[in-house]
Image: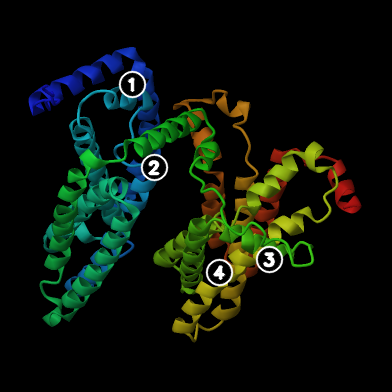
Amino acid sequence: MTTTRPVAPSASEARARVQAVTQRYARRGGRTTVRGRAYPAYLLALFTVFYLVPVVHARSTSPAPFSVSSVNVSAGAAPLVCALAVAVCWGGQLAGRFWGPLVVQPFLLHVLMSTDLSPAHYLGTIARRRLAYAGTATLLAVCSAAYLATDLFDHVGTALPGLAVTAGISAVAAAAWLWGQVRAVRDNFLLAGAVGVLALVVAAVGGAAPDGRYGHWPAALVPALLAAVIGPPAFRALPSIDLARLARESARASQARTYAWTGTLHHALDLYRPEPRGFPSALIRADGSLRGYLAQGAVRALRTPGRAAAAVTLLPVGGAALTHGVAGSGGGPEWWWWAAGSVGVYLGSGWVGETWRGLRDELTMAPLFGERWGGLPARALVWPVVAVTAGTFLGGALVALFRWPLPDGRAGSTVLLVAASVVLVLGARFLREMKLHLPLELLLPVITPFGDLSGLRVVAWQFDGIVVVLTGVALMIAVPSATGSAVLAVCLAAGCVAAGLRRTGWAHRGLLARLRRG
């Protein structure tokens, strides 16, 4: 009795078979059409002409907002680059857990999984190509940001180390992206901890160098070495990847891509919301009555611990950046801190719990939940308002403690502007969370001498919360008085609330009557 073992195909044969399957799949409609490429190219051209070219021209004819030539760059290079490398590595790992480089079309993945080919044969090529794209995109983005915000590339002495640092960070981003998808959760935590410890050591060594000399070379070499260390193990894990989990990730990504292309980006993001778990009876007291509104919101937030942890991190950090920018003496850097802090608080405000979604459901399904408001706004909004306010002012208090005493006359205006910014952020978050399906009128053409600009309206509708926050901060900065800025922020927030209610169908004459009856 003889047994036969399957003979593994050679590398050249496996490559030819994978190419044949891919080409056959492309003929079935998987290949991108000319129209599919034309619309993104059109939006990219509009972005380049109306935003990128004016910004680059303004940067080339004016001094940089942050000057690195006036300080000892070598002494401060290692800590800054290490912090950036850690953030990029952790961000790449997190992105890989949700949408990694191996996510492909479900049908194509099913066909390749049904063959006798090893996953390394048909996933290796995809991984190498997409990692090259990701590394190049990260390199261009970091170099562009450094050119627009600093004078790093204005001098040869800082341009070469800066280019080496950006290349190393781009390689780390690509390798960490693959690592986050193919390695287990325990391995990801080990890598995150090891990278954090290594960054602290390199930052300490680079800062302790005499006169800070040669501090930029370890900062440039360590990211590249880190990418070389984590890249090969990530590729060696391809043969043992969990194909069932990859199939689920590909199916979810395909559905999310369909939602995004049809205009419902918030539905695409809802696919990646974690399912609430734990605390099944924590909302009820021992006597059978419901807990208070604040306790209910806190329990619902704890049922999604990942989102709650992100909110706990973002709110104080955003509050610190916001307070730092508001308390400054005025100017470009302080304004950037103000805007960045407001965006951080806005992002954290959406992760403090699921009460926003509950409020939207109850407002849009009045026949199911009844026409009377009752305690609906209080029950749904007490926890987000208290959590966002407390987290923001906690970060702001830490900044004020380290910068105390504040400049003369800035203490009162700082508190007022921070509070106004929080009100603006909450209004923008309410507008975002009351979003339903894409309005049909946004798809109508907007004919201008520059072409059809309806795509920009769709993009603005998708990111309306961030647009409101950035526009509101810019208008508050333009107002010379702190009181005027606060009044402006309150008016913008009230407008956002009115627009959000209109989206849910509650903005009509009977609204005040419902409020009185409730």
SS assignment at label 2: helix
SS assignment at label 3: helix
Amino acid on which disc 4 is placed: Gly
Q: Which of the two discs, 4 and 2, labels the residue nearer the N terminus?
A: 2
Instruction: Give the foreground label among 1 and 2.
Output: 1
Seen at 48% across and 83% down, the residue is 401
Q: How many marks?
A: 4
Give percent across and percent down for residue 231. Answer: 18, 49
Amino acid on which disc 3 is placed: Ala
**Depicted 51 relative to depicted 12: above or below:** below
Seen at 34% across and 54% down, the residue is 185
Q: Which residue is mark 3?
A: 295
Check whether the beta carbons of the residues at disc 4 and disc 2 lie within 8 A of each other: no
Seen at 12% across and 58% down, the residue is 160
Give percent across and percent down for residue 246. Answer: 35, 37
Q: Which residue is mark 4?
A: 391
What's the mark number on residue 32? 1
Relative to 440, 9 lies left or right: left
Instruction: Give the foreground label among 4 and 2.
Output: 4
The answer for how far apart the CA atoms under marks 1 and 3 are is: 50 Å
Q: Residues within 10 Å of mark 1 (few under 14, many from 20)?
A: few
Q: Which residue is mark 2?
A: 51
